């Protein structure tokens, strides 16, 4: 019965040719059948006063599964005349039909069978496969336009009785199969256009979501840029600190060089007196000068490397800002393209509606013209029969004249009268033929006009196809923009890795500087004896600093060289530090 009611409603609505009202009998029967289908297999629920068995419970569940159904539920609850849940369910079905989303709402219910088992028995129609078939048939109701007034009707007290007489087939319906085939073709075209419109709306929504995602990614990039700027500011501060520390180191080295210069001058004075004993001391001083000059060059090289890294970071920041501006420009272009696509969709929809109206009018005109042509053909047949009869009568009259010229001279007057009458009939027939020719010419002109209109419609369809191609091109451009966006993200990741590497290098430099700062160098004036052998320093027994502990020893107690964390090259170390460092290396102590 559901199949018959849906099929009969669609056929009658298409033959009706306009929007349906609530008084339309097939529409009323459809709602009654749907009410019976939804009531089949409902579980009985106990209420406070009596047992309850209504379909409002499962229909109210649609709001949780389908967010767009919240408007229908709210409007049904706000209706003042409804007092029973059955009346609310009837109003809900009518509003869903007017929105053309009844099939979508019921499909959500059928998918969630675990939730439906609370309201229906296991053998109910909605729990079996037949319910899915009925929901599939309800998709065809999207063709119908209904205008139902829910406020004025008494939906609580209606009696749902199915009228089976409406679904009995008549001979007229069997005879109108060709017309139904034409209507079905028109319906297929309309459904195809609606599906195209839905696809276009879905693509527009997807483009909106993509634009939102691009905006979110843009905000993320701006935040990352701010974080990178803060990091650069921190790196600049650290660079300033390192420069200040390097300047202090340079000052200390200069002071130490001045002190060494003073020592060298004194040594030169003593060298004049004792040249042979001071050769070794002179060589040690040269070594110290070379070591200190190498340290100074290493520090200057590190400073130049840090300056180069700073320039590279600034260039990377400029490139990031340029990329962000370009992405903002592309976002603006995408929004403009979306607006253009929306305008094109609206124009296409308006053109399709106009073409549908013009097709309907042309079908009516064609039917009228067919009726006129049938009438003209019948008139032509009658005229041809008359001409044949007249020709036969003429032949008979001539035969009779030849036979009866000698016999019936008296009848010549009557024959002449008959001939004049027949000539008048011939004149009338000729005038009728002229009129028919004029009708044919007018019909041919109408047919040519219709052909022109059809060609115009074909041109419009070609324009729609071209618009589709443009839309596909826009989609390709969008994909290309996505690829560019992914490439830019990869570039940003590479820049982030480079920044991390630069941070690690700066940390290493900091640790090296801290290691240098931790040393406390004793002054030459304060040391008078060697710390290990406790012998007094003299011109022959020179002073030497340990590069690890910073204290002063004689040449015999500090003649060892080892590489330290502060300097990878081997440096002078005292005997005690040398023993400690060797023990650490042997025991793998960090």
Image (cartoon, grey):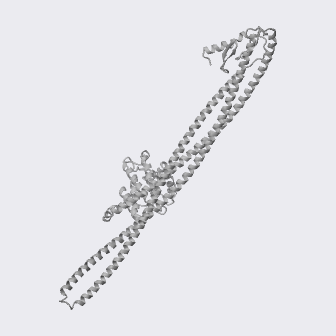
Kindly tell me whether residue 17 is visible in this rendering: no
The residue nearer to you, when weighing 116 against 100, is 100
- Image x and y of residue 421, in percent: 28, 85
Quarter of the image for the N terminus: give it: bottom left
The residue nearer to you, when weighing 308 against 355, is 308
The residue nearer to you, when weighing 74 against 560, is 560
Kindly tell me whether residue 514 is visible in this rendering: yes
Vertical arrangement, residue 581 with respect to residue 233, above or below: above
Position of 366 with respect to 217 (left or right) is left
- Image x and y of residue 270, in percent: 81, 11
Which residue is at 35% across, 70% downward?
A: 371
| Label tally | 0
- Image x and y of residue 30, in percent: 39, 59
- Residue 5 found in image quarter: bottom left
- Residue 185 found in image quarter: bottom left
The residue nearer to you, when weighing 478 against 513, is 478
Vertical arrangement, residue 588 with respect to residue 496, above or below: above
Which residue is at 35% across, 63% downward?
A: 179
- Residue 16 found in image quarter: bottom left
- Image x and y of residue 355, in percent: 45, 62
Quarter of the image for the C terminus: give it: top right
């Amino acid at each position: 019965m559901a199949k018959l009611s849906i099929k009969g409603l669609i056929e009658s609505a298409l033959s009706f040719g306009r929007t349906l009202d609530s008084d339309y009998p097939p529409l009323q029967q459809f709602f009654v059948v749907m009410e019976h289908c939804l009531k089949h297999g409902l579980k009985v629920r106990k209420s406070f006063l009596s047992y309850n068995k209504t379909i409002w419970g499962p229909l109210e569940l649609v709001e949780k599964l389908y967010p767009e159904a919240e408007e229908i539920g709210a409007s049904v609850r706000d209706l003042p005349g409804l007092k029973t849940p059955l009346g609310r369910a009837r109003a809900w079905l009518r509003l869903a039909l007017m929105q053309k989303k009844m099939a979508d709402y019921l499909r959500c219910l059928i998918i969630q069978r675990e939730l439906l088992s609370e309201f229906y028995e296991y053998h109910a129609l909605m729990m079996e496969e037949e319910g899915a078939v009925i929901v599939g048939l309800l998709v065809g109701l999207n063709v119908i336009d209904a205008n139902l007034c829910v406020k004025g009707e008494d939906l609580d007290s209606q009696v749902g009785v199915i009228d089976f007489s409406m679904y009995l087939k008549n001979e007229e319906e069997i005879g109108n199969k060709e017309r139904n085939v034409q209507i079905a073709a028109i319906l297929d075209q309309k459904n195809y256009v609606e599906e195209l419109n839905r696809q276009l709306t879905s693509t527009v929504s997807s483009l909106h979501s993509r634009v939102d995602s691009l905006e979110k990614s843009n905000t993320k990039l701006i935040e990352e840029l701010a974080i990178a700027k803060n990091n650069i500011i921190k790196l600049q501060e650290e660079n300033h600190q390192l420069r200040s520390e390097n300047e202090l180191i340079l000052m200390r080295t200069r002071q130490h060089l001045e002190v060494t210069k003073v020592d060298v001058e004194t040594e030169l004075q003593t060298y004049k007196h004792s040249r042979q004993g001071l050769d070794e001391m002179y060589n040690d001083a040269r070594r110290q000068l070379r070591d200190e000059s190498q340290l100074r060059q290493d520090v200057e090289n590190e400073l130049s490397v840090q300056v180069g890294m700073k320039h590279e970071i600034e260039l990377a920041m400029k490139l990031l800002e340029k990329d962000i501006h370009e992405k903002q420009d592309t976002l603006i272009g995408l929004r403009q393209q979306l607006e253009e696509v929306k305008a094109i969709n609206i124009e296409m929809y308006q053109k399709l509606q106009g073409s549908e109206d013009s097709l309907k009018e042309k079908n009516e005109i064609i039917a009228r013209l067919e009726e006129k042509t049938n009438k003209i053909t019948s008139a032509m047949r009658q005229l041809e029969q008359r001409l044949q009869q007249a020709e036969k009568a003429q032949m008979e009259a001539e035969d009779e004249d030849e036979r009866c010229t000698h016999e019936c001279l008296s009848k010549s007057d009557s024959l002449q009268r008959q001939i004049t009458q027949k000539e008048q009939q011939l004149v009338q027939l000729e005038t009728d033929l002229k009129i028919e020719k004029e009708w044919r010419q007018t019909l041919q002109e109408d047919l040519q006009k219709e052909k022109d209109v059809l060609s115009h419609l074909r041109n419009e369809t070609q324009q729609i196809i071209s618009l589709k191609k443009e839309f596909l091109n826009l989609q390709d451009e969008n994909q290309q923009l996505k690829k560019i966006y992914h490439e830019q993200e990869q570039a940003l990741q590479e820049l982030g890795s480079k920044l991390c590497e630069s941070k690690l290098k700066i940390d290493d430099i900091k640790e090296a500087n801290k290691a240098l700062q931790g040393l406390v160098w004793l002054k030459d004036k304060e040391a008078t004896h060697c710390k290990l052998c406790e012998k007094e320093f003299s011109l022959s027994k020179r002073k030497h600093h340990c590069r690890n502990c910073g204290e002063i020893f004689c040449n015999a107690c500090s003649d060892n060289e080892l590489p330290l964390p502060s300097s990878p090259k081997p440096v002078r170390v005292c005997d005690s530090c040398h023993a400690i460092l060797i023990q650490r290396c042997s025991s793998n102590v960090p």
